Image (spheres, helix red, strand yellow):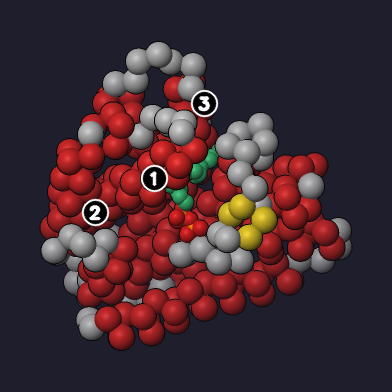
């Protein structure tokens, strides 16, 4: 897929997810307008839609349509958005900006931002539940998303992250364990839920999981390279792949994991868009 076609396809997919999310949120009645505005602000303003697109695209590669995956993809975006809203709060990462705009608590106040995060998480499960009986493997898809975003995944990863701040020595194993849950788990949940809804067999699901594992790891290393530059500017050092593994090793790991992710995509038919997505996110890895 050439760059121009990819851009068009990517835009198309972002629009489809945003339209679904917007229509869904609009259809909810009797909600305090500020709560709905906060939810829309947190989920719709910018963002790459990486996890939801992966969920839909994996489904499309296997069964030819992404339609059945859409409610799950939207739910994953809700969960991702809630995690960002809560992560930005003063009690967590204390970030004033998100996606180039004031973070949710800066725009709406801390009290409302906490409720916006809660509402996004709860709504994600409402949405998945509404489809779980009429979608083949819908319940399994919901379970994998729940597991990967909850106390066996993202929430525990965030807890480990908080614990790191109190540790004097952080090992490579500590960092990997933290990232596997905080960042990679939701990406794996997104990919696997798409595969489950497409009724992929266990061998295909294994390949999908490995694809998402390697992509998720590379994604975090890239994020750490970006944070590392910011941290240097702030003269304060957070534990990340660059200061724990060293710049060269971190770069080597990033390249290795992207190449591995492509290997596991080979097992999927119609994988052109996902390969092009990898090239777009990591243009330096050939
Ligand atoms: C509060 C339970 C809870 C969890 C927070 C996601 C997270 C856990 C923290 C965000 C901080 C961070 C540096 C995460 C690692 C990489 C990451 C998830 C970046 C943001 O994801 P993108 O780049 O965001 O996909 P967009 O804005 O494109 O949707």
Mark 1 vs mark 2: in front: 1
Q: Earlier in the sequence, mark 1 or mark 2?
A: 2
Q: CA distance from mark 3 to mark 2?
A: 28 Å
Quarter of the rendering containing residue 217: top left
Looking at the image, is 209 positioned above or below residue 69?
Answer: above
Q: Are marks 3 and 1 in contact (CB under 8 Å)?
A: no
Q: Earlier in the sequence, mark 3 or mark 1?
A: 3
Query: Which mark is on residue 162?
Result: 3
**Quadrant position of the C terminus in the picture:** bottom left
Q: Residue at x 35, y 56 (%)?
A: 191
Q: Residue at x 42, y 30 (%)?
A: 237
The percent position of residue 206, horizontal first and vertical second, equals 22, 49
Quarter of the rendering containing residue 43: bottom right
Name the residue that disc number 1 marks. 229
Query: Which mark is on residue 211?
Result: 2
For the residue labelled by badge 2, is the local secondary structure a helix, a strand or a loop?
helix
Q: Residue at x 52, y 78 (%)?
A: 15
Q: Is residue 61 left or right of residue 167?
A: left
Mark 3 vs mark 1: in front: 1
Q: Nearer the viewer, residue 56 or 234?
A: 234
The percent position of residue 64, horizontal first and vertical second, equals 32, 77
């Amino acid at each position: 897929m050439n760059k121009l076609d990819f851009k068009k396809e990517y835009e198309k997919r972002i629009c489809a997810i945003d339209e679904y999310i917007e229509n869904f949120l609009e259809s909810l009645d009797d909600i305090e307008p500020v709560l709905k505005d906060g939810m829309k602000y947190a989920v719709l303003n910018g963002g790459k839609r990486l996890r939801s697109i992966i969920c839909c695209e994996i489904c499309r590669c296997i069964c030819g349509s992404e339609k059945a995956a859409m409610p799950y993809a939207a739910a994953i975006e809700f969960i991702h958005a809630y995690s960002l809203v809560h992560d930005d709060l003063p009690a967590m990462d204390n970030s004033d900006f998100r996606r180039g705009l004031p973070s949710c608590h800066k725009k709406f106040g801390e009290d409302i931002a906490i409720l916006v995060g809660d509402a996004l998480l709860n709504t994600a499960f409402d949405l998945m539940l509404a489809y779980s009986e009429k979608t083949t493997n819908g319940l399994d898809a919901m379970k994998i998303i729940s597991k990967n975003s909850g106390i066996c995944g993202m929430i525990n990863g965030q807890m480990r992250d908080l614990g790191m701040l109190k540790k004097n020595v952080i090992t490579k194993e500590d960092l990997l364990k933290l990232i596997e849950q905080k960042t990679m788990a939701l990406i794996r949940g997104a990919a696997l839920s798409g595969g489950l809804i497409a009724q992929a067999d266990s061998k295909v699901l294994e390949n999908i999981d490995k694809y998402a594992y390697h992509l998720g790891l590379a994604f975090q290393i890239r994020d750490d390279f970006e944070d590392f530059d910011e941290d240097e500017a702030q003269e304060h050092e957070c534990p990340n792949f660059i200061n724990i593994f060293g710049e060269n090793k971190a770069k080597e790991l990033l390249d290795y994991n992207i190449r591995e992710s492509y290997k596991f995509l080979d097992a999927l038919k119609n994988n052109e868009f996902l390969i092009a997505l990898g090239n777009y996110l990591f243009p330096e890895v050939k």
